[in-house]
Image (tube, rainbow, N blue to C red):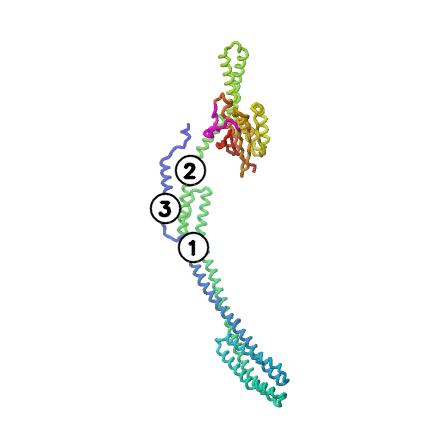
Amino acid sequence: MRNRDRPSAEPGHAVSYRRRVAETTRTPAPRAGVTTQRLFTIILGVLSLLMLVTTVSGTYALTSTAAVSNRLSDRISPAATAVVTLRGALVDQETGVRGYLLSGDRDFLQPYRDGQAAEAASRERIRSLLPDVPAVQAQLGAVQAQAERWRSAVAEPMVAARDRQPAPPDTAALLSRGKADFDRIRSDLVTLESTIGAARTAARADLAGARQLRDGIFLAIFVVFVAGLAAVAVLLRLAVLRPLGRLRVAARQVAGGDFGQHLPRNGPRDLVDLADDMDEMRRQISDALTRSISAGEQLRQQAVELQRSNADLEQFAYVASHDLQEPLRKVASFCQMLERRYATELDDRGRQYLHFAVDGASRMQVLINDLLMFSRVGRVYDDVEDVDLHQVVEQAERDLSHRIEESGATVTYDGLPVVPGDQTLLALLWQNLLGNAVKFAHPGRPPRVTVEVRADDDEWTFAVADNGIGIESTYADKIFVIFQRLHPRGSYPGTGIGLALCKRIVEFHGGRIWLDDGYSGGARICFTLPRRS
């Protein structure tokens, strides 16, 4: 029966499948054509070249515009302002001399002296600002020569004459002659101002032209950039996005269950390779689906058989709990009746036989009840609710009160939490753990049982420690196996199901249980239970 349920081997199909897998995992031979990476490299190279050309052009335009603007604002305009300052300095000199001649007050000569210093400073500033304009330099020299001629021929003699005579008779004539000489200076200044004004007009025209060139270059840069982006977008759509879209549509059809749909092979070389790999994956998935459907049918049949087997187990449990219990009760009761009625007529051997029969029937009843309890974990008791373990342990302590009083045991616990689980199963868990701790007591001292709890990230860790006879570490796994006993049946009562039942209950609640093999002075059983979410 077991061999018939096992899937039949198909050597030819397995060999062909391994050969196909090996072919798909083999390194493919290189193909001709442009890959997506190379296409993007070419596009980025072209864009980089365009950006370099446009950047150089824009830098040239900005530099030219800045140079023209700086010449106008930093040299020509300050030079025009210096000419105005030069005119004012010369006028101050002429006004100071005139005022001294008319009033004789030497305070009027202070503007004359200050004007000479301001004149010299203005001339030097104009020379330094426009050293590359010969006309300005020549006209500035003419103004300087004319001013020196006016001071030496008119201003200084007039001041000297006024110093000698308080009111010279020819003052009007001197002033008239001085005005004529100063008008020639004014004429040279007008020429200088006209030259600088012409230079300013030319610089403004150059600035307007540079700005127009700059705007044209930046407009060209914008047009080239937009055109490049549009070309890149069209190229990417035609060469990459459209083939990817077709491949995506075909892949969705395959994902939807159409495993007969072949994937298109167009676009760059690596997209074609991707389509080939995906198509091979489609073929393998199709083959695997066929095999999984066959395996699923076999699993369905096995599930039906398992369900029938579970029904048989349910029937067996029913028979064990009813039909088997009744004969055992009759055997035990009739043996007890025989013992009471004919005990005086039987010898010691006969009474011993009757005792063995009664004890065997009783132990069989206990064993059947324990087996039923073990089989019902997770099948009958599955009501999950919030369980207060403090109350559960108190109830287990009350149920074991007779044994606890007889042995003089003490049970210590505190701070036990509320956990999600089945209250009946958790009560069985604690009753078995506390009962074992009291049962396997050390002959020389009264039992002392300590319950500890520790909160971890998502679970509670419990420990039940006693000072009894202890368990050797070599039996750490054996003690949780059903019917495994470490002591003779006459030494300690029980069927060997208690810790196996504890393990089943803990695992049913999603925890784990183990023996703390590092604990000395008794036994220490540890287990975990999940915390409330």
Nearest the viewer among 503 and 37 is: 503
Image quadrant holding the C terminus, namely: top right
Residue 467 percent coordinates (x, y): 53, 28
Between 50 and 355, the one lying in front of the other is 355
Looking at this view, name the residue that lies furthest to the top. Answer: 345
What is the number of the mark on residue 392? none
State how far apart marks 2 and 1 are (Cα): 41 Å
Q: Position of residue 197 (x, y in %)?
A: 53, 76
Q: Magenta region: which residues?
A: 467-487
Q: Residues within 10 Å of mark 1 (few under 14, many from 20)?
A: some
Residue at left 46%, top 32%?
A: 300
**Does the segment drawn in magenta span residue 95?**
no
Name above or below for residue 90 compared with residue 501: below
Label 3 sits on what residue type?
A: Thr
Question: Pointer 1: what residue?
Answer: 40
Q: Give the alpha-carbon distance from disc 3 to disc 2, as whole Å.
A: 27 Å
Does residue 73 lie above or below 9 as drawn?
Answer: below
Q: Does the rendering let one see residue 231?
A: yes
Q: Residue furthest bottom?
A: 169
Q: Which residue is mark 3?
A: 27
* Image location of residue 193, percent across then percent down: 54, 78
Residue 334 lies, in percent from the top left, at 53, 14
Mark 1–mark 3 Cα distance, whole angstroms, equals: 25 Å
At numbered mark 1, what does the secondary structure look like: helix, strand or loop? helix
Residue 290 circle label: 2
Query: In terms of depth relative to the viewer, which is nearer, 205 or 491?
Result: 491
